[in-house]
Image (cartoon, rainbow, N blue to C red):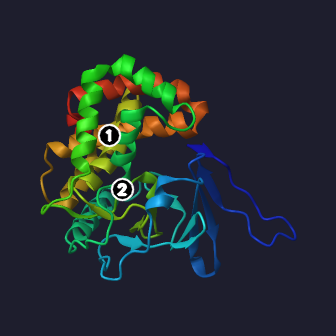
Amino acid sequence: MRDFGRGAAGMGEAVPAPVRAFGTDAVRTEVFATDGGRVRWRRTFAAGSAVLRAVGAVPASVHLPHAAVQFVLPRWEGRTAEYPVRGTRLLLDSPEGRATVFRDLGRGLRSLHALPCDPALPRGPLGPARLAEWLRSGHGPGLSGLYRGQLRSALGKRRLSRLSQWCAALSEVNEDSVVLHGSVGMGTTVLAADHRPQLLTGEGLCLGDRWFDLGWLLGELMEVRLVLAGQGRPEVAADLGVSAWELVAGYGIPPDHRVGRVSALRMLSHGLDISSFAAHLVPQLRSHTRLLADVVDAEGTQVLP
């Protein structure tokens, strides 16, 4: 993820400089402090983004829960979603209170998944749909076509076929489907001063498999853990493993095999993002692909250490 640094507003500027800014060519996030301790997170998407094509007003019949997590809806202006929140820290910015944060996230997602399914919501999360199309066609922005060819050589047809099948399964909506956040992750979870998680919500809200949200976030944690372990930092990796279990404990339902499969797709999605929008990080994809092969073979069982 490219960090655009911190800045201070110059004299005569109509708009203050962000206190924090980061992102890729796909989406840029800028954080602005406002009076009274309020903070605005502005997420600007690239023209043609799948998020922009899919996003719409949340149906009035969908009442987001008031739970351990605050679900924050945006105000849209063109390609930019603006979220009023309380805080500038992301999920892993501080280890303080982390166990409680992840347990609260699990509780919050369980509350969201308990909402009545509104047929006006999109069917199936964007992430797997995007992966399925790219795996099928090999076409995409940046170096993603080249990455697709490298994956075919490194992973082989059997593994790629399994990934495609897992994507297809997540596009199905049936009587067991729930209301999903659809884009829960480290970059969409903001911590308030009291450590209460605030989920930037609305970019991916949809109906789908209940294990998608949990697996998508656990997949991010798993990838970071595997990388840290490979860098000789097992203590930090172990701490994130504890966080993963706290998330599951907060959710309150033992996960099944679908969580591991979703976690593998989350890793693949990160690789696709890098090849599409962060060319300077492409050299990292060789080691990333080796890790992904192991995760696919194990169906993501590494997701909970």
Q: Comparing marks 2 and 1, which lies closer to the viewer?
A: 1
Q: Secondary structure at mark 2?
A: helix
> Where in the figure is residue 98, as x and y percent of width and height?
36, 56
- On the rendered structure, is 247 left or right of 189? left
Q: Secondary structure at mark 1?
A: helix
Q: Residue at x 45, y 37 (%)?
A: 272
- Residue assigned mark 1: 265
219 lies above or below 21: above
- On the rendered structure, is 250 left or right of 121? left
> Where in the figure is residue 60, as x and y percent of width and height?
35, 82
Q: Residue at x 21, y 53 (%)?
A: 172
215 lies above or below 40: above
Q: Which mark is residue 98?
A: 2
In terms of sequence position, does the residue under pointer 2 or pointer 1 come before the other? 2
Image-quadrant location for residue 61: bottom left
> Where in the figure is residue 76, as x and y percent of width and height?
55, 71
